[in-house]
Image: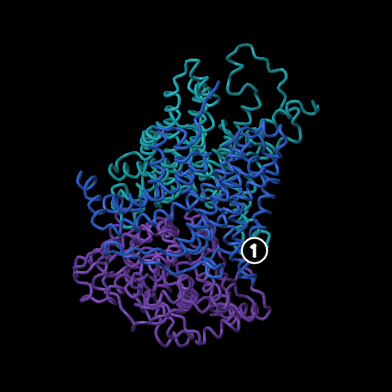
Amino acid sequence: MEPRIPGRLGEKSQMLYRTAGQFKTSYEADQALFPVRQDALLLGVILAFAWVIFPLTASEFTFQTLLIPILIYALAAMGLNILTGYAGQLSLGTAAFMGVGAYACYKMVTLMPWMNPVVAILLSGVFSAGVGVAFGIPSLRIKGFYLAIATLAAQFFLVWLFEKWAWLYNYNASGAIQVPNLEMFGVYVAGPQANSLVQYYVVLAIVSVMTMLCINLTRGNLGRTWKATRDMDIAAELIGINLMKSKLTAFMVSSYVVGVAGALFVFMWRGAAEPNLFDIPLSFRILFIAIIGGLGSILGNYLGAILIVGLPVVLGIVPAALGIPIASATVEHINVMMVGALIVFFLIIEPHGLAQLWRLIREKLIIWPFPH
Amino acid sequence: MLNQIFVAPFIDMIGAPDFLLQVLWEGLVSGILYALIALGFVLIYRSSRIFNFAQGIMVVFAALTLVGLHAMGVPAWVSVGLTLLVMFGLALVIERVVLRPLVGQPDIILFMATIGITLFLIGFGEIIFGGENKVMITEELGIPTGSVMFEPWGGLLILEQKDITAVIVAALLVVALLLFLNRTRMGRAIRALGDDHQAALSVGISLQTIWVLVWFIAGIIALVTGIAWGARAGVSFALEVIAYKALPVLMLGGLESISGAIIGGLMIGMLEKLFEIYWGQPLLGGNTETWFAFVLALIVLLFRPQGLFGEKIIERV
Amino acid sequence: MRHLTRLAAVAALGAVMGTGVAAQELYAPNLSYRTGPFAATGIPLMNGQRDYMTMLNARDGGIGGIPVNFEECETGYSTEKGVECYEKTKGQAIVTQPWSTGITLQVLPKTNVDEIPILAPGYGFSPMADGKVFQWAFNTPASYWDAASMMLEYIGEENLKGKKVAFLHLDHPFGKEPLPLMEKKAADIGFELVPIPVGLKEMQNQSAQWLQIRRERPDYVIMWGWGAMNAGAITEAVKTRFPMDKFIGVWWAGHDADLKLVGEDGKGYKSISFSYPVLDSPLMADIKKYVVDEGKTMSNEEEMQGVFYSRGLVISMILAEGIRTAQEHAGKAEISPADLRWGLENLNITEERLAELGMTGMVPPFQTTCADHTGHSGGWMLEWDGEKFVKASDLLQAEAEVIRPLEQQMAAEYAAENEPWAVSDTCDAES
């Protein structure tokens, strides 16, 4: 799901993006997912790229460093976004919940080798949802940054637990988990024997389904409850919203999505994991994606993931491709600096993230070529 | 099992009181350093509502600048002066480039911006100073490096002189800071800004000046922390993780309370050490220090949502 | 044969013109870590590795007449970056050098499928020694279990019986690696083993661990440390007055800069090592002539005298010798990853060969076979004399009879967990 849109817009966008003449005759039509026909078309193009064109053209390197991680990171950010962007509860413990998903999945497939891997991945989210609700309970009393720091308790405690609870990693001497070769319908979908293309399709399918689920949830009754809680929880309580239910469901759904992302992260991409993989830098990375992409937006997670995951990869290739002799350590340093600077830059130009930027572009396009 | 949790640790403590004292001392020294970092957070949060995650990297940056300047042949104390200048420049740049355009944005955006600053400084610092572990110029700064030994109850208690120095310097710094905040014009302006932004602005307090000032003070605190911590284990980017240790201190002490940061820091420093030694290592496989402070703070917060010393939150619709 | 002469001619032409022919090079990328919390130990190693290859390229025009492209791909010791580097380089690379136990664990199963040799000298997964199972993995010249065995041997069985040994280690796959062997030896000899983990966040603040050591009063402390952990541990040991001569580190905990932090106070600290700096060796003279004087090094004089820099040289020598052996066997200069695997399996680094390389005394002689991918070179105990590391023992040898069955057992378990796992049937694991 590449942001191919801006490039294509220049030429004949007046024709391409005219909303005039599309009249709505019912509330249902007006509230539909794609009130503008062009948006649906655009989505069709993106889906075609994701399902057909990328798989046909991508190299192993592209699969492993761009396509698969972008999808997984976007999913993790989506989970966080539900909690932070929609329900307004800042969390710094995302990576630990990913870890719960990953370890749950590992235990399931090693205890029950006959289990379908996709079912195992989807079920592993249930465990992280449970843990998420447990750590969400303090949110009923604690707010703002205090809550953010409280989620760090989950972060550090869970990572410590992954390290100490030997049962979780089947008493492996190294303390790391290794993804076994898993079959589904006679094809390897996980483990070293699995083909990148197969893994990509599994990831894409799961991420697509989850995205649809999230879009529907956030647009529905539950989503509105979350938003009311986010905007002012006391006011929400006064108009009859059950805050406990609202906050805990947000923690539950968010942790479920994050847990599935964690299972995908290890099973469909990394192939092995040690506990400190789920440490705080990963949490921050996902928070960056959610915020740069735009809090309270589903599309933003993808845009953010493309920027945060894709940019360093591209930056790493460019100097070599241009033949500029820079030591790879320096490239890495510049990379870290660039990501830091970009975060500040994007926050300054558009604090509501890339999704908002896209919204602005879209509005400009609708009225183009007239300035107002 | 119950015996191991509720009885045995206390018997251990009484059985070897010298060791208990040593544990408490180690906890106190760590606690002082946590408190110092937390103090940097509190100052900035009070005056600008910014949760400054970059405090940790500022510690590393200040320490590296100091060591780097000295390695270039600058005398130790001149290096300290120059480092302070650098920290002042950093405060100016951060205020101008990052904070000013973000005035009025939601808290989380400002928080993210400080994480951006952190990443930038990590990359920038590694390019300039390199990633090697460096030796803090402890002796050059005139910090004694020996140790004092006591033999209470026939046991052994070792106090490092540089730790003692760190405790004294930190105490002096806190006193100076409190005097500054309570007795000087500028200090009162900072506190006014913390109490009510708009009111403070309306009586002619300059936001920009105060922000630069506050970030500069945070820079001074960072330098002191960097020297004290660097003297223990060298200076490298791995030091940055101690910033996390200040977070539970803030939860416990309250984001706005200076005394809370100090008392919270000392409490956490000592309690986590006691827990690790007497419960964590024998019963839980050790390394509980990574989470103990957070869980403790979380439990306290469940009963006092604004922290032990935070101002009572009054919410209006 | 005609092909070979033409090849040589082209290579010679390339050398004369001073520019490598683009297609003709041996691409041997290194997944370096010059940044991050472990950079302090990474930089001298990377510099040593790089300078050796630079020297070969300058002096001999590479190996077998074609230059080595020793490109670095920076990982910062992050597993994620490491996998990215592996994917990026695996298309052309003849070898992968993962440089972290975490990256090794992830890349190991992939190399088996991609059929690229993975060279992890002195680190990685100890059972990689079993070449029958781990066809593509090499941890030449010595494994972590070798290190643990040699340390215990140095202390001596009679000094261990009934004693207490604290095992201070990083809480990370790397730190846990020697535990199976240590536990076995503890049971066999009859000493008490107290594992003391150090979390990644506690590396620089180990007062809790050293308080535990003070309480436990162990007779020896064995340390499996890396990066910033070593400096932290050594300063704490000095502070708590732990007798330095009872304190032994693994080879990655023997970095000169860490000990310089404490200087004289660290006197007596020991570290096992499979390499040793011989500053007046012909190799060092060549490095100076072709690399340092030409301004091609990233190192400095102080660093070059240290243990880690010369270990970097040894590691690159192992790769270079593997390439050379492979070239002779394949009869061509441009070898494939499979050729290199043969070369690394048939290394025979004798005293004579070391003398030819100008590296006498820098590494013990060793030999690999298709069943033994480690070579089990043995090593020396080094001791810090206040200014530098000096040899404190004769050549020590790991106990093959204890390690070998354990390697085979763990390798078999690994293969079983990763079914289907291609196992070599051409070589006999017993040999």
For residue A177, above or below residue B300: below
* Quadrant placement of the C terminus of chain A: top right
Colour applied to chain A: cyan
Which structural element holds mark 1?
loop
User: What is the x, y in percent for residue B214?
Assistant: 63, 46
Q: Which chain contains the residue that carries disc 1? A: A
- The residue labelled by disc 1 is A326
Say which quarter of the image contains residue C425: bottom left
Colour applied to chain B: blue
User: What is the x, y in percent for residue C283?
Assistant: 52, 84
User: What is the x, y in percent for residue B136?
Assistant: 53, 66
**Looking at the image, which residue sits at the far top?**
A25
| In-front residue for pair B238/C184 | B238
| In-front residue for pair C195/B50 | B50
Q: Residues within 10 Å of mark 1 (few under 14, many from 20)?
A: few
For residue B226, above or below residue A141: below
Q: Is residue B243 left or right of residue A356?
A: left
Q: How is the image coloured?
A: by chain
**In this orientation, does residue A230 appear?**
yes
Q: Is residue B135 left or right of residue A278?
A: right
User: What is the x, y in percent for residue C107?
Assistant: 43, 58
Say which chain is purple. C
